[in-house]
Structure formats: structure tokens, C-alpha cells
Image: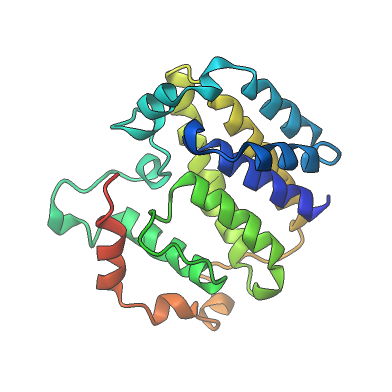
Amino acid sequence: MNKQSIAAGYRLLAELFVNPSQRDESNISNWIMNVKVDLPDVANIVEHFLRLDASLSSNEYVSTLELSPPCPLYLGTHLFEEPSTCSGISSSPRNAYMLELGGVYEHFGFDLGSIELPDFLPVMLEFAALSLEQEEKDTIGLRKRFVEKYLRLGIRPLSTRLEKFKSDYLLLMSAIEILVEKDLQRTADQPMWEPNDETAQSVPLPVLSNSNVDDVIKKCYEIEI
């Protein structure tokens, strides 16, 4: 499988999961062409989605995915319960999830600034593409962990929510699942970084060990969802 096709697929899906009023139609057309040969199922799903009225509706996007949404695009919200108090933020499971995501991003030089949270689906898809193009930076299997333990696990509960609310965006989730499986097939014989593995522990993740945790927590939660 051509990794350039997989990267184009991730970028295509990332673009389609932003508000229709903000999409770059030229990029969408180019990325569809890039995936047609190696990933025809992904191209067919996307082309079918783009023929639906919902794909062009900003109101549909906002009401389903953006404004107090029933199906938020922040994958961590589907994996962990939100803390009920401010004091619970620092010890919440989602906080550890955010910290590791931020650490993996920084390892690859992917800087979010203060624009978005690390678990925003379009951000994760864009990173999946970028890190695939920079595999030489990954010597311990960080990217494989990201795809398998963060992206794949997170899209499943989001798909369940979209199915419950009969959203046409569920189509795009099936395209992401195809990409993820093709991506992981490429690395089936490669190791994945595991924090509890003795070998992995001997190779610390620099951005996690050197980060100021309080600053990262503040940064993650100062953005309104």
C-alpha cells in the first residue's frame, strides 16, 4: 500500500470534518484523485457523502458536531468521563490521554499552539498524515501506538454516537476505519511503544518527561469545547 495514498486519505477526511463553510474544495478534489487508485472504497464513500445535502450544510455540522453537540469531535470525550469539579481535571484519565497525545505530537514537531485540543478529530487525522510522511522520526513505535491506541479506539464510540443520531457523517467514519486498518497493516511486523514495556521504559518519551505538566493541563483546558 502506497503510504502517500494513506496520507492523502487522512488529509481528505480531516478536511471533510471541518465546517463546510471553511473547507478547501480544491484540496478535497485533489485528495480524492490521490486515493482513487489505491483506496477506491475511501474515494467512493467520500464521493457519496459529498452528494448528500448534509455534507454542504453548516447548520447540520454545527448542530451535530460543534455547538453543545450530541456527537463532539473530541475523541477523549467519548473515552473518558469529564471531571465534575475543577480539582478533578489534573487527575482525570482524559488529562493523561491529552498529555501523551501532546507528547507524541511534539516528538514529530507538530505544534498545535493554542488553536485546538489534541484530541480534536481533524487534528488527529492531519497528524496521522504528517507522521506517516516523517516515519524516519519514529524509532520506537510512537506512531503505531497513536494510530492503534488513540485514533482507532476513539473513532469507534464516536461512530456509535453518529449512528444513534442518524448522522450522514457516519459515512466518513467508515472511511477512516478503512484508512486505519490499511495503515496498521503496513506496520503489522513493527513494534509499538508501550509505557509498561521494560524496553520502552529504557527509551523515555522526551516531550513527556521534560514537559511542565501544569502548563500542559492549563493549555488543554483553557480552550472551550
Q: Nearer the viewer, residue 188 or 103?
A: 103
The image shows residue 76 at horizontal and vertical percentages of 39, 47
Residue 139 visible: no
Q: Residue at x 79, y 43 (%)?
A: 34
Applied colour scheme: rainbow
Q: Residue at x 48, y 22 (%)?
A: 57
Q: Look at the picture and state if 211 lies above or below 129.
A: below
- Indicate left or right for 132 with 125 as reference: right
The image shows residue 148 at horizontal and vertical percentages of 59, 52
Q: Residue at x 48, y 80 (%)?
A: 206
Question: Which quarter of the rendering shows the C terminus?
Answer: top left
- Indicate left or right for 56 with 175 as reference: left
- Indicate left or right for 81 with 53 as reference: left
Q: How many numbered marks appear?
A: 0
Q: Nearer the viewer, residue 48 or 214?
A: 48
The image shows residue 21 at horizontal and vertical percentages of 48, 33
The image shows residue 102 at horizontal and vertical percentages of 43, 65
Q: Residue at x 68, y 60 (%)?
A: 132
- Indicate left or right for 176 with 201 as reference: right
Quarter location, residue 113: bottom left
Q: Look at the picture and state if 11 lies above or below 36.
A: below
Residue 82 visible: yes
Q: Look at the picture and state if 165 lies above or below 4.
A: above
